[in-house]
Image (tube, rainbow, N blue to C red):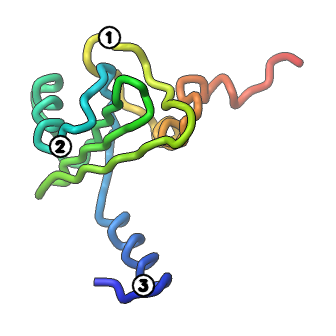
Amino acid sequence: MARGGGDGVRGLDARAASMIRIDAMWLAAEPVDMRAGADRLIARVVEVFGAARAHHGYLFANVRGTRMKLVLHDGFGIWCATRRLNQGRFVWPGATSGALPALTQAQFEALVLGLPWQRLQHMQVITHL
C-alpha cells in the first residue's frame, strides 16, 4: 500500500498499470446503461463474442457518448474502469452488429481523449493545402 504523499501514489499507479496487460481492445457498437457493473458487461461480451478472452479489453459507451467503461479479464479476475468527458462526446460508431474489429493502441489513445480515432491514418499525411 502506498504512503501518503505524491511520490508513493505515483509509484503505486505505475505498478498497477504494469500489472494490467491488454493484448487486444474491442469496441462495442451498441450503447450500454452505465449503471451496469463488471459482471453485466462481461455477460454482454460473452453474448456478443462467445467468450471473454484473457488480456482483451472491451469498451462500452453510454447513449450520449459522454461516458465509457473498459472491462478487462486478466486471467484471474475482472477489471472495470470508467472514463467521463466533462465537455464534448466520445467519437463512437453507430450501432451495427454489436461489435467492431479490434482497436490499435493509437486508436484507443485517441478514443479515450475524445479525438476522431477513425481518421488517424488520414490525419498522418497531408495530401493537399
- Most foreground residue, 98 or 34: 34
Sooner in the amino-acid sequence: mark 2 or mark 1: 2
Distance CA(mark 3)–CA(mark 1): 44 Å
Q: Is mark 1 on a helix, strand or loop?
A: loop
Residue 63 picture location, percent across and down: 35, 23
Mark 1 neighbour density, 10 Å: few (under 14) some (14–19) many (20 or more):
few
Up-down relation of residue 6 to residue 14 (above or below)? below
Residue positioned 39% across, 70% down in the render: 13
Q: Do the residues labelled 3 and 2 touch (CB within 8 Å)?
A: no
Q: In which quarter of the image is the C terminus?
A: top right
Task: Looking at this view, name the residue that lies furthest to the top.
Answer: 96
Helix, strand or loop at label 2? It is: loop
3 or 1: tag closer to the N-terminus: 3
| Amino acid of disc 2 | Gly
Circle number at residue 96: 1
- SS class, disc 3: helix
Image quadrant assignment for residue 46? top left
Residue position for label 2: 37
Graded by Cα atoms within 10 Å as few (under 14), some (14 to 19) or many (20 or more), the crowding at tag 3 reads few
Q: Which residue is drawn at 30% across and 59% down?
A: 20
**Splitting the image into 4 quarters, where does residue 61 fall?**
top left
Query: Gap in Å between the C-alphas at discs 2 and 1?
Result: 23 Å
Which of these two is toward me, 57 or 59?
Answer: 59
Q: Which amino acid does label 1 sit on?
A: Thr
Q: Earlier in the sequence, mark 3 or mark 2?
A: 3
The mark closer to the camera, 3 or 2, is 2
As drawn, the residue found furthest toward the right would be 129
Q: Position of residue 71 (x, y in %)?
A: 25, 44
Residue assigned mark 3: 8
